[in-house]
């Protein structure tokens, strides 16, 4: 990733104002998480969505993937012990996650895609780890990434785009 938020600024990622104006339950619902799913949370930062992802359905596991080990540590510190046991923390780049082929049912990018340096390599990696019939969810600020750029990203990887909203 090219421009990761510095860990000392992580308070801007998870704060009362952002929590109030971001419909986390609604966003996560759109991923269609099912019981037993494994979710790859790319650029998890300090865990703004992690608890929501973990508690969307029964027996969900979340792979926390971030390039900054300290951000993952901040997320793990926030989680109750029972939730932390359902998390696999990985300090990795989006172009080389290192998971098995087809090992995740959902991939979640929230305001992270624009920071990925090599989008083509990232697309190939996401396609490789996404299970057949799985879903990749991309949410981005419109000032950073257009819908067209996200569609192109998915097309490069062979991921079908069916909902642009």
Image (spheres, helix red, strand yellow):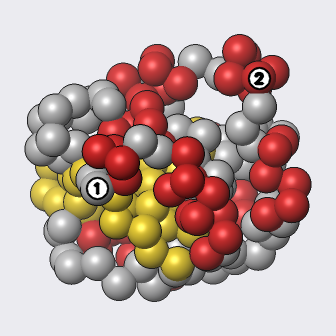
* Quarter of image, res 143: top right
Note whether 59 is above or below 120 in the view shown. Answer: above
**Residue at label 1?**
85
Residue that appears at 43% across and 32% down: 52
Q: Nearer the viewer, residue 161 or 70?
A: 70
Q: Is residue 107 visible?
A: no
Note whether 43 is above or below 80 in the view shown. Answer: below
**Residue at label 2?**
16
Report the label total.
Answer: 2
Q: Nearer the viewer, residue 91 or 138?
A: 91
* Quarter of image, res 156: bottom left
Residue that appears at 72% across and 16% down: 21
Residue that appears at 32% across and 31% down: 55
Q: Is residue 47 left or right of residue 17?
A: left
Q: How crowded is the residue under tag 1: few (<14 C-alpha within 10 Å), some, or many (20+)?
A: few
Q: Is residue 104 left or right of residue 8?
A: left
Q: Nearer the viewer, residue 6 or 110?
A: 6
Q: Quick one: SS at disc 2?
A: helix
Residue that appears at 72% across and 38% down: 14
- Viewport quadrant of the N terminus: bottom right
Q: Quick one: SS at disc 1?
A: loop
Residue 10 placement (x, y as % from top left): 79, 52
* Residue furthest out toward the right: 9
Residue 45 placement (x, y as % from top left): 64, 56
Gap in angstroms between the C-alphas marked 1 and 2: 26 Å
Note whether 33 is above or below 39 in the view shown. Answer: above
* Quarter of image, res 53: top left
Q: Nearer the viewer, residue 114 or 104?
A: 104
Note whether 79 is above or below 63 in the view shown. Answer: above
């Amino acid at each position: 990733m090219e421009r990761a938020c510095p860990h000392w600024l992580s308070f801007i990622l998870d704060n009362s104002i952002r929590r109030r104006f971001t419909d986390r339950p609604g966003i996560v619902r759109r991923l269609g998480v099912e019981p037993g799913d494994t979710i790859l949370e790319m650029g998890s930062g300090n865990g703004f969505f992690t608890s929501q992802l973990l508690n969307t359905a029964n027996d969900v596991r979340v792979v926390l993937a971030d390039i900054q080990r300290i951000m993952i540590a901040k997320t793990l510190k926030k989680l109750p012990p029972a939730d932390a046991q359902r998390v696999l923390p990985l300090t990795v780049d989006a172009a080389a996650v290192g998971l098995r082929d087809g090992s995740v049912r959902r991939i979640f990018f929230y305001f992270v895609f624009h920071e990925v340096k090599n989008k083509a390599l990232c697309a190939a990696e996401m396609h490789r780890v996404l299970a057949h019939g799985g879903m990749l969810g991309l949410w981005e600020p419109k000032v950073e990434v257009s819908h067209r750029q996200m569609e192109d990203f998915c097309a490069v990887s062979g991921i079908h785009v069916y909902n642009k909203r």
